[in-house]
Every structure is written in C-alpha cells, then in structure tokens.
Image (cartoon, rainbow, N blue to C red):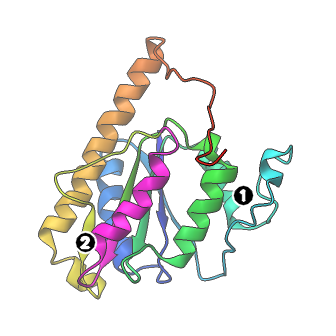
Amino acid sequence: MKVLLFNGSPHEKGCTYTALSETARVLEENGVETEIVWLGKAPISSCWSCGACRKGLGKCVQEDIVNEMAQKCDGADGFVFGSPVHYAGASGALTAFMGRLFYSGSKALAYKPVAGMVSCRRGGASAAFDQINKYFTINNMPVVSANYWNQVHGNLPAEVEKDEEGLQNARIIGYNMVWLLKCIELGKNAGITPQTEKKIKTNFIR
C-alpha cells in the first residue's frame, strides 16, 4: 500500500512539510509506503475549461506536473493534500493543481481514502481546510478524519514542532488512514466493492 502526500507550499521543507512528515512517519511505521510530493515553485495554470480531458484525450491538455501526478495517483492507495493558509484559503498552487487533477484525473482518485492538512501562523485554517475537503466529497472519496480539524500552527517549522495538539492530530490521520486502507483491502478480498449509479446532471435554470 502507498500513500501520496502533496505539499502545496512554496517552501519545500517548511511548516506544511513538517505536518505531512508526522503523518508519513506513522504510515511508514505501520507498513504503508509514503511519498511526499512537493509541487514546487513553477507556475501551475488553472483549468482552461476546454473539456479536452473528457473528449477523448484522457488527460489534461496542459503538459505539466498535473498529468505526471495523475499517473502516480493511479497507482496509489490513499492521499493527503497539504497547504499553507493564504488569506484564509489554500495556496494558489495547490488550488490550481487540485482543480485540474480532480477534473482530468478523477478516476485515479475516486474511492480512495484522503485527508487534508493546513498550516497557518494564526487564523484562517478552518476556511482553508473546508476548501480542500470539498474536492474529496465531490469525488466519492472516504475522508480520513482525526480528533480535531487537521491544522498545525506556527510561522516556522520549529514553531510547528511545538504545536503538540496539531502534531498529534497529524499522527492520528496516519493511524486512521492505515485502518481504512486495511479495511478496504479486506473488503476487496471478500468481493466487496463500491456501488454507484450513472451520474445525473440537472441545471438550476431551464
């Protein structure tokens, strides 16, 4: 089993990474392979709404990290999406990345456990956390929770390391992720798979 943890911060080894590393450590200790993927500093364009990915192309028309990660997601069993809080929202990089990944590569993500993680100096964490979670709940993904909202506080990694409650929450995400992954594996072995229906789309204005 493998879990991908996405770091949407412009700082590769900053506060968001510190929180994700705590979750990754628990996963590794319980036999789950992990990879923390830093989105980097290169610009990530938002979706062009061209529809090419769903008109036969099978991937985003923009050739960048999104298509690369969509392929990785196809072989992964679970995910954590992490971001610093910018103006009470997720980073621009993570927002653009998730928007395109979840639209063009939704099949690689669906029915797999996922969690969000946010890091902030002081305020805006719950709003950013809520933003990230909306991607999961529109794509048939079991959301991994903990005993509080998934957030850590600090302006520097050393300060995050002092946030005992936040780091404990990051560890509990790991424990619960392991539990769900093992439950899903047992279910598959017993022939239990998700049931669904063909998507019905209605518009508010006729």
Residue 29 image offset from top left, x and y in percent: 30, 48
Mark 2 vs mark 1, CA separation in Å:
30 Å
Q: Is residue 164 left or right of residue 187?
A: left
Q: Is residue 46 left or right of residue 169?
A: right
47 and 18: which is toward the camera: 47
Residue 183 image offset from top left, x and y in percent: 35, 27
Residue 23 image offset from top left, x and y in percent: 31, 57
SS at badge 1? helix
Depicted 89 relative to depicted 173: above or below: below
The residue that mark 1 highlights is: 67
Q: Is residue 66 left or right of residue 180?
A: right
Disc nearer the start of the sequence (2/1): 1
Residue 80 included in the magenta stretch of the image: no
Q: Residue at x 36, y 78 (%)?
A: 88
In this picture, which residue range is highlighted in magenta? 117-140
Give the label on residue 17, or none.
none
The residue that mark 2 highlights is: 152
125 and 27: which is toward the camera: 125
Depicted 177 relative to depicted 47: above or below: above
Mark 2 is on which residue type?
Answer: Val
Q: Quadrant of residue 160?
A: bottom left
Q: Quadrant of residue 84?
A: bottom left
Q: Residue at x 27, y 48 (%)?
A: 145
Q: Residue furthest bottom?
A: 155
- For mark 1, does the 10 Å Cα neighbourhood hold few (<14), some (14 to 19), or many (20 or more) residues? many
Depicted 135 relative to depicted 127: above or below: above
